[in-house]
Image (tube, helix red, strand yellow):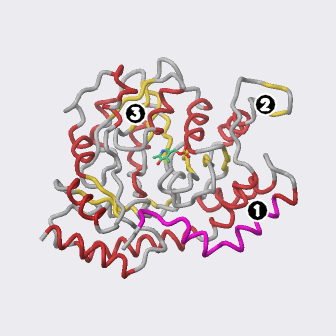
């Protein structure tokens, strides 16, 4: 048996003709940067998310950096985020010269624990970056309430959550801005790098368009030192094909997750925790167990790939040593890093494969 954590080849084979045609269309046009494919994708995603604006950029990390910059966040400012996420969520805060401040997570959803936010807000706090981890949205409505009381901006890091919902509203559409990543392994993945920002703030969108293009609105007239960060036409054309399948793929992931929930419910494992208002899209299906490392070995010996998301919380990363956090500061996130493991959960995974994986877990744990 050999079951990968994600099977991009299997997915490509289901859409190969359309993808190849889309790529040829761009090659024939010889229009590669800031062209009609990118513009069309921006319009499609804004419509999908229910926002006025969408701005495509080079990757999900730049989406955060440009948004922080456009909001005027920099040295002397603090931005609160979660320690249980991919590094970029906090790296970008540091990259614009501001200070990342970490608040602990909820043990069930693994998203920011909103009861812990108030204690982290100081006079220097300018923004909150909630992350919808593994495709389950955090309660952004409540974060917006907290933010408006303290006059803070909210940037949803929705890199893992395109298409996820909270009370029927799409990830990215509730904050002042929301960012997506089109890294190949994300639920909507390019065949290279890509990212996007959605917002209802037209002024912010204009600022982002200026920043992604060397700080100019009119070519060769530079208002600011900006960036070179655009979604290229080939990636945009590929993403437009894949975007048409996004809802179907997310639904397939939800079905797979439902089957795992049923097959594994009686085992001594913590299954992915649910927020009843959040429609999860299972970017990853993450279990928790004290025997995590042995489970990984057992599955690996049987040919089943797993992943650890995440092995080390961000407040304990070497890169943030100077922030002065120590072990024990954010115990829920630290514990999650010791127990979490992702098992294969992607649209092309078959029921037979899922049952094989479940049988291995049952064999090992009972
Ligand atoms: C993938 C990811 C990013 C970064 O996106 P890139 O496109 O790889 O730059 C940021 N935040 C989270 C939560 C991610 O999962």
Residue 283, quarter of picture: bottom left
Q: CA distance from mark 3 to mark 1?
A: 40 Å
Question: On screen, 112 above or below 71?
Answer: below
Outermost residue, left direction? 366
Tag 1 residue = 23
SS at badge 2: strand
Judge left or right: residue 149 versus residue 116.
right
Residues shaded magenta: 4-26
Q: CA distance from mark 1 to mark 2?
A: 29 Å
Outermost residue, bottom direction? 352
Residue 326, quarter of picture: top left
Instruction: Work out which quarter of the rendered image holds the N terminus and state it.
Output: bottom left
Nearest the eye: 107 or 284: 284
Residue 256: x and y in percent read: 39, 74
Question: On screen, 213 above or below 159?
Answer: above
Dot 1 crowding, Cα within 10 Å, few <14, some 14–19, many 20+: some
Residue 236: x and y in percent read: 71, 56
Residue 25: x and y in percent read: 82, 63
Is the CB–ligand 1 distance for label 3 below 8 Å?
no
- Which mark sits nearer the N-terminus, 1 or 2? 1
Tag 3 residue = 80
Dot 2 crowding, Cα within 10 Å, few <14, some 14–19, many 20+: some
* Circle 3/circle 1 CB separation < 8 Å: no
């Amino acid at each position: 048996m050999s079951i990968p954590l994600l099977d991009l080849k299997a997915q490509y084979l289901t859409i190969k003709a359309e993808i190849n045609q889309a790529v040829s269309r761009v090659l024939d046009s010889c229009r590669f940067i800031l062209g009609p494919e990118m513009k069309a994708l921006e319009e499609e995603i804004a419509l999908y998310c229910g926002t006025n604006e969408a701005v495509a950029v080079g990757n999900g990390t730049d989406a955060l950096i440009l948004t922080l910059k456009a909001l005027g966040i920099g040295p002397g400012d603090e931005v609160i985020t979660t320690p249980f996420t991919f590094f970029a969520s906090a790296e970008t805060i540091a990259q614009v010269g501001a200070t990342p401040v970490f608040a602990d997570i909820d043990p069930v959803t693994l998203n920011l624990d909103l009861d812990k936010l108030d204690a982290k807000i100081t006079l220097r706090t300018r923004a909150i970056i909630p992350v919808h981890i593994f495709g389950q949205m955090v309660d952004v409505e409540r974060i917006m309430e907290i933010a408006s009381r303290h006059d803070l901006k909210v940037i949803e890091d929705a890199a893992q959550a395109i298409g996820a919902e909270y009370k029927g509203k799409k990830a990215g559409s509730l904050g002042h801005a929301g960012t997506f990543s089109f890294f190949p392994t994300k639920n909507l993945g390019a065949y290279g790098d890509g990212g996007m920002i959605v917002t209802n703030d037209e002024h912010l969108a204009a600022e982002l368009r200026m920043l992604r293009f060397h700080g100019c609105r009119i070519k060769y007239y530079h208002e600011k030192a900006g960036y070179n960060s655009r979604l290229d036409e080939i990636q945009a054309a590929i993403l437009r094909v894949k975007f048409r399948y996004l809802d179907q793929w997310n639904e397939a992931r939800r079905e797979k997750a439902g089957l795992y929930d049923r097959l594994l419910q009686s085992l001594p494992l913590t299954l992915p925790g649910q927020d009843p208002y959040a429609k999860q899209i299972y970017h990853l299906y993450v279990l928790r167990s004290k025997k995590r490392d042995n489970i990984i070995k057992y599955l690996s010996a049987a040919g089943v790939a797993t992943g650890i998301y995440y092995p080390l919380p961000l407040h304990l990363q070497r890169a943030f040593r100077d922030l002065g956090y120590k072990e024990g500061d954010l115990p829920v996130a630290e514990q999650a890093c010791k127990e979490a493991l992702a098992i294969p959960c992607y649209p092309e995974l078959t029921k037979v494969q899922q049952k094989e994986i479940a049988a291995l877990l049952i064999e090992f744990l009972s």
